[in-house]
Image (cartoon, grey):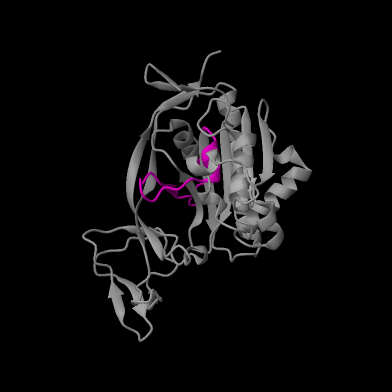
Amino acid sequence: MTSRCGVCCYNEAKRVAIFGGTHGNEMSGIMLVNMWSKNEAEIQRSGVMTKPFITNPRAVEKCTRYVDTDLNRAFTPENLSAPCADELPYEVQRAQEINKMFGPKGSANAYDVIFDLHNTTSNMGSTLILESSADHFTLQMVHYIKKAIAPASCPVLLNEHPLLKYSTSRSVAKHPIGLEVGPQPQGVLRSNIFESMRAIMKHALDFIELFNNGVEFPPCSVDVFRVQERMDYPRDTNGNITAMVHPNLQDCDWEPLNPGDPMFQTFDGRTIPYEGSSPVYPTFINEAAYYEKQQAFVTTRRETLAAYAIRKTEQ
């Protein structure tokens, strides 16, 4: 990226990948990628090579989140640089393979854009996930998508937290974008969720085509929800859960949780309130996959980011 007269210049996004099946029981991305692998016409754009790709085929075959370990946490420097060996967890081996195909991560040879398609059991709607507030290309893209699907909602989750950010499969690309659509149970395919994901991908690819064709996108502002804290369930001294997400909070992703609001409900009916000092916006509320990660939800704070104008670098 270069900056000139207040405009950020990026190279054309000529190589794009669409990942499905990073988690093998999240069906919308799996079905879309399989469909596009058979007929790529819907995802092709002029001057762009778009590759649909199943990232975790063994987990997809078993319809389980993962085989040995979470692939979407496996793209660490330690894993990617580990000597190849059959004894490595399957997902670590797979991460190394994906890094060779679409990276190397952090290099000039990495794919320009990777979209990673996910489902959630939480009531998050269609959520775009960013990993950097300094990537004005992706900020402009999500602004374009939000305008294109309006009045439908499309929250933007920004995870730059040094302790809560994780090494995703999409992080191999120069410009990673996550798409999380729900609610949808694990192993289930819902038509409305499938079509929402499909529509967002259409607009995302349209944006890339416009950018590559020389369209300059003016400065804009993007409302985001910045990840703040991971909240666990109340537990006893043996680590067993002793309370559930409170009915007043259940399914209320992106809505404000104020100090004193009900947060958990114990099995005997007692309410545990939120004791923070200011309102937060919870999301991934009661996500089924996060019980093993000791997470009831994550808190976020709303903020508005200023995206610079962007255009493609002059050749």
Does the magenta segment cover residue 158? Answer: yes
88 vs 27, nearest the viewer: 88
Q: Residue at x 52, y 63 (%)?
A: 289
Height in image: 261 above or below 198? Answer: below
Q: Position of residue 245 (x, y in %)?
A: 40, 72
Give the extent of the magenta segment: 147-174
177 vs 124, nearest the viewer: 177
Q: Residue at x 64, y 57 (%)?
A: 24
Quadrant of residue 230 in the image?
Answer: bottom left
Q: Position of residue 229 (x, y in %)?
A: 33, 56
Q: How many marks?
A: 0
Q: Residue at x 37, y 73 (%)?
A: 248
Residue closest to the far bottom: 268
For residue 76, say whether it is visible. Answer: no
Q: Position of residue 227 (x, y in %)?
A: 37, 51
304 vs 90, nearest the viewer: 90
For residue 97, say whether it is visible. Answer: yes
Q: What secondary structure is the magenta-colored segment mainly?
A: loop
Residue closest to the far right: 38
In the displayed structure image, the side of residue 52 where residue 145 appears, left or right: left
Locate the C terminus and report the quarter of the image it occupies: top right
Q: Position of residue 68 (x, y in %)?
A: 59, 58
Residue closest to the far top: 315
Does the magenta segment cover residue 49? Answer: no
Height in image: 268 above or below 206? Answer: below
Height in image: 7 above or below 28? Answer: above
